[in-house]
């Protein structure tokens, strides 16, 4: 087979075999690239909505709301736990519904929290519980990551899984930096005139339009829905029932790799969600909203690099290197913090945290490549034992690998809830974040050992 075929009206690929070199060179690469870049655009927007509260919460009390520090950390953390929970069903939906259809539907759902948040911000009587509901709905953006990565895994041959998943996940992660970069810019102007609503006044002084933090993304989401519906593809032959995909939950590798991904991606998204508010509590004189975007953007660049290096040197080796860097940087944060012996150093704190962002998402890219390789190998062996032959072996392995990638990403996303909550609780009870940082370094060391024990001893 040298050419792929598809139904142009429904955008269904009738024949798809990226492992065939001739097919890949002649048509597969072009089709995969088109699906990848539309997926990246949709995923960037999903991450923007998922993390929009990390920028909004900093301003809420300055425009007339009166939430406690713990409540603000809750609002920053709720989208992460919601996104983590949603990733579990989203992990299995692509082989049931199809990647193109689901990408369109899940992207369109982002409009709900966008529009609701834009309205809620304009009413200073909006309750904490209403904001909490909106924050939970923002988790749809986090859930989209699981289905997006599962979908893109179908389009790339195994030798390029690190590249394809790294680009999709890495640039998608960049949405965190994009939202933290754009929000300070768009809230300072009346983007939509009377249609967008009246301004709020920061501490009864300067005017801002905080609702723009949510409403700004609406037209981009509409464009994403149109692009995904008309120019992405569903792949015939990659269908699978929910019950058959759930077989991965009985495999030991599922839970080991979920722990690894919780440590890498979970740390990245958790630090992204809590960094601005954490900095505000430690260095209150610094306007961190102007600098918070840099860490997530550096992480977005690091993730595809982690995937690329894993394709060349193995996901295991790069993941272990990432863990070592994560241990070092989490410990280096400690002496930069203010305490009894001094006011700390924001410059050093910020610099070390940038290294932590890079290390965690470097590990996200490498660990995802590792997960893909592990499950494709074990699923191929299972398919052969079941008597499957020919292309059906690869199709089975692709579906199971896709389900594993989605599920482990769901577990990893819980880090986005855990880390802000740990920081918030530690500040409330201990007035310090020393213990959490030491705890993270110990956790990374444990994960490094588990990774070696499971996948490194025989390399």
Image (tube, helix red, strand yellow):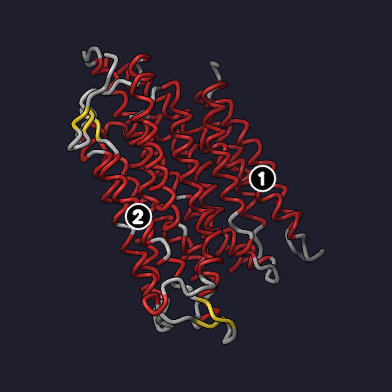
Q: Position of residue 361 (x, y in %)?
A: 55, 41
Label 2 neighbour load within 10 Å: few <14, some 14-19, many 20+: many
Looking at the image, residue 416 sits to the left or right of residue 29; the answer is right
Q: Position of residue 268 (x, y in %)?
A: 54, 47
Where is 246 relative to 203, above or below?
above
Residue identified by numbered label 1: 355
Q: Position of residue 456 (x, y in %)?
A: 55, 22
**Residue, x 36% and y 67% (percent of image)?**
134
Nearer to the camera, 97 or 3: 3
Q: Position of residue 378 (x, y in %)?
A: 36, 21
Q: How many marks?
A: 2
Nearer to the camera, 101 or 65: 101
Element carrying mark 1: helix
Quarter of image, res 293: bottom right
Any mark on residue 396, and which? none
Looking at the image, residue 54 sits to the left or right of residue 442; the answer is left
Element carrying mark 2: helix
**Residue, x 54% and y 28% (percent of image)?**
308
Label 1 neighbour load within 10 Å: few <14, some 14-19, many 20+: some
Discs 2, 1 touching: Cβ within 8 Å: no
Nearer to the camera, 90 or 222: 222
Quarter of image, res 445: top right
Label 2 to label 1, Cα distance in Å? Answer: 29 Å
Q: Quadrant of the C terminus?
A: top right
Lower position in the chain sequence, tag 2 or tag 1? 2
Q: Residue furthest bottom?
A: 204
**Residue, x 58% and y 33% (percent of image)?**
448
Where is 98 relative to 63, above or below?
above
**Residue, x 64% and y 68% (percent of image)?**
281
Q: Quadrant of the N terminus?
A: top left
Residue identified by numbered label 2: 140
């Amino acid at each position: 087979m040298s050419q792929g075929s598809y139904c142009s009206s429904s955008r269904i690929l009738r024949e798809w075999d990226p492992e065939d070199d001739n097919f890949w060179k002649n048509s597969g690469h072009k089709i995969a690239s088109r699906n990848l870049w539309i997926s990246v655009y949709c995923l960037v927007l999903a991450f923007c909505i998922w993390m929009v509260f990390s920028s909004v919460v900093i301003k809420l009390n300055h425009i007339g709301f009166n939430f406690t520090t713990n409540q603000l950390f809750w609002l920053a953390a709720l989208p992460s736990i919601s996104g983590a929970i949603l990733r579990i069903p989203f992990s299995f939906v692509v082989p049931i519904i199809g990647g193109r259809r689901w990408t369109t539907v899940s992207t369109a759902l982002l409009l709900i929290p966008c529009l609701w948040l834009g309205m809620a911000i304009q009413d200073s009587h909006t309750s904490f519980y209403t904001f909490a509901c909106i924050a939970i709905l923002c988790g749809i953006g986090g859930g989209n990551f699981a289905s997006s990565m599962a979908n893109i895994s179908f389009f790339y041959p195994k030798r390029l899984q690190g590249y394809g998943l790294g680009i999709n996940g890495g640039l998608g992660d960049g949405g965190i930096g994009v939202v933290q970069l754009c929000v300070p810019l768009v809230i300072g102007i009346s983007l939509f005139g009377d249609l967008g609503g009246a301004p709020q006044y920061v501490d009864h002084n300067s005017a801002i339009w905080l609702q723009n933090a949510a409403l700004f993304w609406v037209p981009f989401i509409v464009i994403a829905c149109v692009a995904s519906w008309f120019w992405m593809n569903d792949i015939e032959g990659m269908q699978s029932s929910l019950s058959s995909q759930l077989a991965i939950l009985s495999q030991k590798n599922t839970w080991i790799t979920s722990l690894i991904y919780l440590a890498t991606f979970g740390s990245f998204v958790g630090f992204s969600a809590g960094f601005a508010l954490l900095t505000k509590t430690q260095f209150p004189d610094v306007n961190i909203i102007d600098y918070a975007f840099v860490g997530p953007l550096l992480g977005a660049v690091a993730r595809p690099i982690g995937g690329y290096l894993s394709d060349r040197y193995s996901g295991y080796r790069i993941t272990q290197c990432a863990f070592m860097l994560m241990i070092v940087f989490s410990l280096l944060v400690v002496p930069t913090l203010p305490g009894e012996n001094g006011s700390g150093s924001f410059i050093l704190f910020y610099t070390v945290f940038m290294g932590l962002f890079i290390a965690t998402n470097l590990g996200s890219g490498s660990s995802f490549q590792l997960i893909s390789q592990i499950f494709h190998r074990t699923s191929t062996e299972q398919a052969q034992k079941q008597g499957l032959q020919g292309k059906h072996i690869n199709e089975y392995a692709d579906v199971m690998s896709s389900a594993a990638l989605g599920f482990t990403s769901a577990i990893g996303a819980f880090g986005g809830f855990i880390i802000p909550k740990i920081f918030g609780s530690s500040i409330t009870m201990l007035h310090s974040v020393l213990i959490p940082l030491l705890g993270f370094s110990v956790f990374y060391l444990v994960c490094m050992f588990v990774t070696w024990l499971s996948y490194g001893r025989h390399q």
